[in-house]
């Protein structure tokens, strides 16, 4: 049986990062703890691999993309794929090798981010799909290696963020709908625990204020960035009110816009003659929908590319922590009609 650093840490009653630091000569480990770890290593016959030996070296360039709930979200199929495409485009240009790790809420509870980085000898990480209260997001503030976050801001000693100006972008697409003459709208919100949901909601509020509309003139449904939830909410709304109330759906993601489109058609209505719909993300899938859905193209692959570039530059000591906004674009198609 192969003995891992996690086995040693468990047997010694310490964290993985403490074992790694003790074996690599760090002075912040007490002599008592160091001896206990060394004794456990001998008893278990643990042999550190070369990657672990590199952890204390200034030449260590092991980096990874850590993705929360990989494969559990409908949106992640294409969204995460585009992040990966951009990230790998950057590293492939420089012949750098990166790893990708999928995690979930249980893993975050059972193993700290510091321990994960120590176990895989990581010199830098990029985090994707984090919720506001995720343990790894909290830990990122104090991480002692460079950490780049996608779409989530954390002020830390070694953190940087790459994102879209979600507030401005959602204000712009809401302006576009309201400028068509709509006085009432339906807002299809994302996940409450996602930072981008709150930013986009702020943009939505700002647009309503500019157009002298009250929040009471907007129906709001929390659909968790899920197509099926958006479908159910939109269908229930249309079956209840028909065309007697709001006839424009403003969605916080493309995948939810697809659910709304399905609901409109299931109720026997057409887009945009009966109801208007907008999305947000710029997913390639929307190019095949008829009529085309007006959306915000986040240039998602650029987030992956820029995120990895920032991480690599932080490892080289060429960049301080920062917030980088990737340019977005309003893509006007045929899904919004004049009132």
Image (spheres, grey):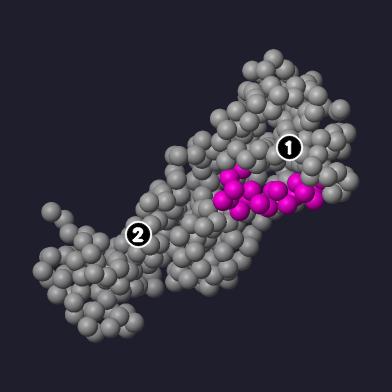
Residue 194, x across and y down, in percent: 58, 50
| Marks 1,2: beta carbons within 8 A | no
Residue 120, x across and y down, in percent: 33, 60
Q: Could you say which is closer to the camera, residue 171 or residue 132? A: 132
Name the residue at 66% across, 56% down: 325
Q: Could you say which is closer to the camera, residue 118 or residue 84? A: 118
Q: Is 108 on the left or on the right of 173, as rendered?
A: left
Please check the rendered image and state whether residue 248 is part of the magenta-colored stretch, yes or no: no
Front tag of 1 and 2 = 1
Instruction: Determine the secondary structure under disc 2.
Output: loop
Residue placed under numbered mark 1 in the picture: 219
Please check the rendered image and state whether residue 204 is part of the magenta-colored stretch, yes or no: yes
Residue placed under numbered mark 2 in the picture: 111
Q: Quadrant location of the N terminus?
A: bottom left
Q: Is residue 186 visible?
A: yes
Name the residue at 32% across, 83% down: 27
Q: How many other residues sit within 10 Å of disc 1, few (<14), some (14-19) or many (≥20)?
A: some
Name the residue at 14% across, 75% down: 39
Residue 76, x across and y down, in percent: 51, 40
Q: Is residue 295 visible?
A: no
Q: Which residues are magenta?
A: 190-208
Q: Is 312 on the left or on the right of 110, as rendered?
A: right
> Which corner quadrant of the image does residue 163 belong to?
bottom right
> Which corner quadrant of the image does residue 16 belong to?
bottom left
Residue 4, x across and y down, in percent: 21, 60
Spatial separation of the CA atoms under disc 1 and disc 2: 41 Å
Which numbered disc flags the more N-terminal residue, 1 or 2? 2
Secondary structure mostly seen in magenta is helix
Q: Is 327 on the left or on the right of 115, as rendered?
A: right
Name the residue at 75% across, 46% down: 204
């Amino acid at each position: 049986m192969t003995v891992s650093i996690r086995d040693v840490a468990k047997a010694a009653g310490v964290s993985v990062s403490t074992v790694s630091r003790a074996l690599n000569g760090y002075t912040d480990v007490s002599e008592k703890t160091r001896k206990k770890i060394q004794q456990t290593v001998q008893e278990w016959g643990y042999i550190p691999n070369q990657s672990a030996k590199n952890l204390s070296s200034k030449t260590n360039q092991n980096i990874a993309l850590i993705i929360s709930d990989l494969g559990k979200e409908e949106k992640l199929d294409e969204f995460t794929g585009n992040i990966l495409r951009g990230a790998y485009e950057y590293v492939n240009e420089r012949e750098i090798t990166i790893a990708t790790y999928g995690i979930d809420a249980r893993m975050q509870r059972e193993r700290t981010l510091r321990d994960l980085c120590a176990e895989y000898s990581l010199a830098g990480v990029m985090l994707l799909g984090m919720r506001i209260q995720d343990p790894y997001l909290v830990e990122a503030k104090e991480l002692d290696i460079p950490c780049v976050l996608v779409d989530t801001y954390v002020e830390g000693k070694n953190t940087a963020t790459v994102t879209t100006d979600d507030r401005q972008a959602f204000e712009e697409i809401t302006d576009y709908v309201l400028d068509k003459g709509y006085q009432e709208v339906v807002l299809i919100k994302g996940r409450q625990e996602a930072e981008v949901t709150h930013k986009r909601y702020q943009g939505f509020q700002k647009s309503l204020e500019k157009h002298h509309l009250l929040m009471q003139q907007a129906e709001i449904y929390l659909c968790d960035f899920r197509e099926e939830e958006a479908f159910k909410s939109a269908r229930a709304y249309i079956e209840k009110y028909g065309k007697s109330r709001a006839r424009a759906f403003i969605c916080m993601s493309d995948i939810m816009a697809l659910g709304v489109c399905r609901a409109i058609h299931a109720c026997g209505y057409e887009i945009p003659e009966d109801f208007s719909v907008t999305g947000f993300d710029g997913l390639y899938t929307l190019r095949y929908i008829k009529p085309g859905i007006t959306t915000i193209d986040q240039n998602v692959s650029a987030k992956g590319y820029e995120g990895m570039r920032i991480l690599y530059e932080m490892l080289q000591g060429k960049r301080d922590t920062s917030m980088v906004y990737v340019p977005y674009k309003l893509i006007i198609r045929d899904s919004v009609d004049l009132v």
